[in-house]
Amino acid sequence: MTSFTFQANTLTCSGIPLDDIGRQCGTPAFIYSEESLQRNISVLKSAFGERGIHVSYAMKANSNLAILGMMRAAGFGVDIVSGGELYLVDAAGFTGKDISFAGMGKTREEMVAALKAEVAQFNVESAFELEMLNQAAEKLGKKPDVLLRLNPDIDAQTHPKITTGLRENKFGMPAEEVFKHFLSREKYPHLNFVGIHCHIGSQILKPLPFIDLVDYLVKYTARLEAAGARITKVDLGGGFGVDYETPFRDILETTPFLGEIADYAAEKLGHYQLYIQPGRVLVANTAVLLTRVIGLKHNDLKTFVVVDGAMTDMLRPSLYGAYHALIPTTRDSGKMTVDVVGPVCETGDYFAHNREISTVEQNDFIALGSAGAYGYVMASTYNARPLAPEILIQSEGSIKIIRQRQTYADFLALNS
Ligand code: LLP
């Protein structure tokens, strides 16, 4: 269970009715449960941490400073993909030794900033990156640890837009190329080749792709070492999925195979320092996007429920056709089948088509589930819509604004 529960037909978070939060703080708003965040952290710690597998939080899923602070306090490292993320993790108190720098198009400026911050490892995805990083390291007199990202051509059996480990995808390098770089590592004297990184995709709901990945890496690392390379680190990436249909369930129920994968990886690859980089599974079910019904409109085909949240707040339905649960905060025995849409001038601005939900009226609240991952971080200000606030319901039931709503004046700030 997460801390979102119905009490007397009203959806609450740690005992506080979401309607009260909506009236007090306005909508749309992201509402996070600290209890759920701590619960997920402890699940990951016991599944992986206790088997000696280092957890590096993939902050692209959610980079709010308060949430980063919790990940740091848990002893997790952090996986970044840009100079902007490097800046944020510094503000959240992480130091270089906690940071791995992934991403398939790091700029020279970003490499220099990360070298100066002495990040623990660079996950490198191409020959051009090896050249650039080697040069930057030479200039700064550094010798960073490098893992090469291998594209193993394993089908993660997930949505095509978030599959990353197939040959046709832009990520990583083919096995033969990684092999070649390892064996000619003296060409890059300012880099320390220490291991292999893979990330095969996101929202993976079956253990098999991960088991295949471990099997693949067992053979691959053995081949590399037989050819004379020395490997100390293996990074298995992230990608553990969650069940979007049951947003308030515990991740041990929606993603029951975490321990199985951890056991298998520790057994087969435990002679290396092992890393994983989960994002979604740590944060998805810890938040809802609370919206308010602006009005209902009908035509001869449909009823549209127009809410004040939009694709600008949660892009996943529009971008991936992703399913998110829509939960009116007051349970009603009546049902209606509707399209739930936002106010943005795009036909693609919708949260659901032909969805049966409890009856709602103007001014009622609807919570969109599983909004903690890839929600705020993918938001935009299209149609000059201010970014929604982020609100944390602390374990003891108090409300803390962890990011203010953007103001109209903020829109003018960068104009000149
Ligand atoms: N490591 C690397 C190198 C990644 O590229 C990603 C995600 C992760 C770790 C974390 O994956 P996770 O554990 O969160 O699945 N916007 C999409 C998801 C894109 C994921 C990109 N990479 C969505 O909303 O579904």
Image: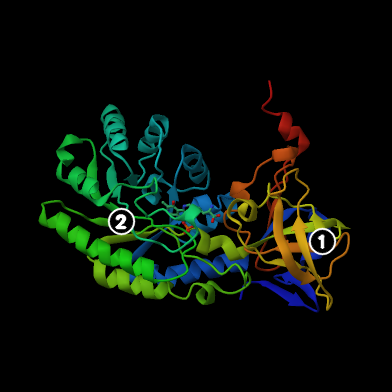
* Depth check, front residue: 29 or 368: 368
Horizontal side, residue 154 vs residue 365: left or right = left
* Depth check, front residue: 412 or 169: 169
Say which quarter of the image contains residue 306.
bottom right
SS of the residue under disc 2: loop
Q: Amino acid at mark 1?
A: Leu
SS of the residue under disc 1: loop
Mark 1 touches mark 2? (CB < 8 Å): no
Counting from the top left corner in percent of width and height, residue 362 is at: 88, 60
The numbered dot on residue 380 is none
| Residue at image coords 57%, 62% | 284
Q: Amino acid at mark 2?
A: Pro
Q: Which residue is mark 1?
A: 301
Considering the image in quadrants, where does the C terminus appear? top right
Above or below, 167 against 280 in this view is above
How far is mark 1 from mark 2, CA to CA? 47 Å
Q: Which residue is mark 2?
A: 152
* Depth check, front residue: 160 or 307: 160
